[in-house]
Amino acid sequence: MTALIQRQFAVLSFITAFLFLMTGALALNNNKLMVASSTIQRAASHISSVALLTWMGREIPALNGTVQVDSTAGSVSGFLFQVATSIHPGDLRSLLGRELPGMITLDDSRFIVEGKGASLTDFYVEYPPHPRQVIDASPSVQDPPATDQTEGTQTGEKPGEEKKPPSTVSPTPPKEKVVYVYTSHNRESWYSETKPNGASLDHPTRNISLVSRHLSEALNERGIGADVSTHDIYQQLVDKKKDYSLSYAESLQVLQAAKQEHRELHYFFDLHRDTVPRKESTATINGKTYARVLIVVGKRNKNHQQNEAFATELHKLMEEMYPELSRGVMEKGAKTDHGEYNQSISPGSLLLEIGGVENTLEESLNTAEALADVFAAYYFKAEKASTPAADEPKEG
């Protein structure tokens, strides 16, 4: 017994001496080496709520009756292993996900709400433009030629197709702009509009910007003040000799300028085109074909929870008004993607993936109309709920 106490005393003495020396080394010559709060936050982010409740249950027995204990989640050694290696025991993707492109781990990306047919293969992955792409000098979608053919270009009409009447925006649209539609990757296009060019399909004029413009017009028609970006982000990056990965930083400057001009702006929609197969990106509703919508929320922003709640409400409305149009709501972090998507600018900011490369411009424009219907239902319901009863018109 005496020998055991002596060994324990020796170990404690050694640990105390080590801590004393370490503290002295850190304080020597104003050494700035320290554990930053961001480091602690990143480490704490590895702790799941189940693991935390399991550990607390060891001190508060009543918690054990409500928490399903998981040996891996509740293991301190397992947690330390995850922090040190970023590998989750029992999840093979955490081991291979950093080495195999496209394999994304659930700790960084997950479905908040799953749409019909949602699966791990649907995870949104950004593709840069093909490195050999040549910038077309023809007029871009932001500067259409002033001819009678412009309307046909905007609506995606082909020679020989029946010409559709132009979209008629309300002659007295709302003066207050509350929605801003833009495209960080404004040249994303479709097979039907451009020749395949590597993993990513891009076009200087026939691109997702047409859908953004149509969504803005449709919102104004429904009595919601909306504005649309006329910036060619891709060309701006080329002119400034910046990398394509800085697209969001470039579009953020556009958002800040727009918000400075219209301080009432609250909703910001960044439209993109995804790369999933047609069978997953297309829905037929009442005989009409639509490009399905995936809502993406970035975890690296201060409005994360509010954006998530907003996205979930829109998804539910889509399910009611246009069943199967939504592919769900996805949450993305910084390990495999941008993870912020300029959504810190407002709790009403979302990234909307409209269809995939095998959809058509017409199907995407149909989706813009549907999105305008869905958002109008959300917006006017929210406006009514925020209006005091005393301000409501009396029946009589």
Image: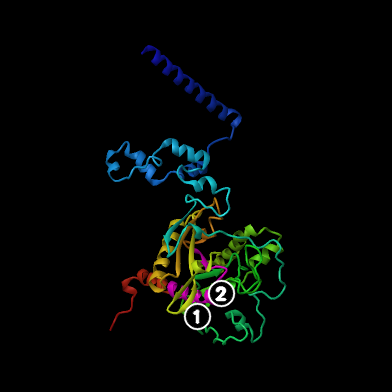
Taking the view exactly as shown, the residue that stands out farthest to the front is 279
* Mark closer to the chain start, 2 or 1: 1
* Residue toward you, 86 or 333: 86
Does 12 appear in magenta? no
Q: Amino acid at mark 1?
A: Pro
Q: Is residue 109 depicted above or below 67 in this figure?
A: below
Does 367 appear in magenta? yes
Horizontal placement of 196 versus 312: left or right?
Answer: right
Query: How many labels were placed on the picture?
Result: 2
> Could you say whether the residue bearing mark 2 is in a helix, strand or loop?
loop
Please rate how many residues cluster around mark 1, counting C-alpha atoms within 10 Å: few if below 14, some from 14 to 19, many from 20.
Answer: some
Question: Which quadrant, please, contains the C terminus?
Answer: bottom left
What residue sits 53% from the left and 37% below the top? 35
Q: Does any portion of residue 80 appear in the rendered image?
A: yes
Q: Which residue is mark 2?
A: 360
> Could you say whether the residue bearing mark 1 is in a helix, strand or loop?
loop
What residue sits 54% from the left and 27% below the top? 22
Q: Which residue is mark 1?
A: 173
Q: Is residue 368 depicted above or below 63 in this figure?
A: below
Please rate how many residues cluster around mark 2, counting C-alpha atoms within 10 Å: few if below 14, some from 14 to 19, many from 20.
Answer: many
Question: Which quadrant, please, contains the N terminus?
Answer: top left
Write the start and end of the magenta stretch as one range.
Answer: 349-375
